[in-house]
Amino acid sequence: MEHADRHLTRRDLTRGGIGLAGTLLCGCGAEPSRPTRADVAVPATDTADPYVDIETLYRQVRVDISTLEVDTVQFVAEDRVVIGRDGDGVYAMSSICPHANCDMRRKGEITSFGLACNCHGSRFDRIGRVLRGPAERDLVHYLVSPLDQDTVLVEINHNVPQSTRLQG
């Protein structure tokens, strides 16, 4: 009997189904892999960073706050973080504009009113609320924990409400 004329039998289907089920079940107990940079590509534009940096997402950033004055914000060098202090305490937020994922450390600035994204003109106040679009969402805030009197730990994978502050 030629291969092209062969018809599948119920036995063939059963054997194939059992093999497939076994393969799937073996994979169920596997530990999920950590996403790679290529797994989380965001829409690229000519001005936006085309990838979310996975290593940044899983990191905790140490920040010296000894020179951070009340009612000011600062970009954290080498990290996509803005650290700020107001009358209620210390807070941290993302430096990534939610409109087109531009990093305001590179394509933005700190101004008298807060933050300016120079990619498309979005403006944010000192605590990350949108003042002017095209951004429609506020900046993401991160958990801040004390390490010592002058150093805090910013947990980038732990989002908190805008009102969350580390006292001091």
Image (tube, rainbow, N blue to C red):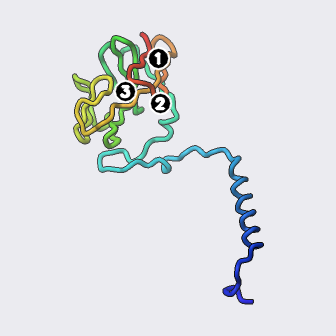
Looking at the image, the residue that sits furthest to the front is 10
Task: Tell me: 168 left or right of 148.
Answer: left
Q: Is residue 130 above or below residue 99?
A: above
Q: Which label was assigned to residue 37?
A: none
Q: Is residue 42 above or below residue 21?
A: above
Q: Give 33 or 26, whichever is nearer the viewer.
A: 26
Looking at the image, the residue that sits furthest to the bottom is 1
* Residue to which mark 1 is pinned: 151
Q: Is residue 98 above or below residue 150?
A: below
Query: What is the CA distance from the residue labelled 2 to the residue labelled 1?
Result: 16 Å
Q: Residue at x 22, y 38 (%)?
A: 121
Q: Secondary structure at mark 1?
A: strand
Three-letter amino acid code at the position of disc 2: Ile
Q: Residues within 10 Å of mark 2 (few under 14, many from 20)?
A: many
Going from the N terminus, do you reach mark 3 or mark 1 first? 3
Q: Residue 125's quadrant in the figure?
A: top left
Tell me the quarter of the image containing the C terminus.
top left
Q: Secondary structure at mark 3?
A: strand
Q: Residues within 10 Å of mark 1 (few under 14, many from 20)?
A: some
Percent of width and height locating residue 130: 28, 30
Kindly indicate whether the residue at mark 1 contacts the one at mark 2 (C-beta within 8 angstroms).
no
- Front of the two marks 3 and 1: 3
Q: Which label was assigned to residue 156?
A: 2
- Total residue callouts: 3
Three-letter amino acid code at the position of disc 1: Thr
Q: Is residue 95 above or below residue 32?
A: above
Going from the N terminus, do you reach mark 2 or mark 3 first? 3
Going from the N terminus, do you reach mark 2 or mark 1 first? 1
* Residue to which mark 3 is pinned: 82
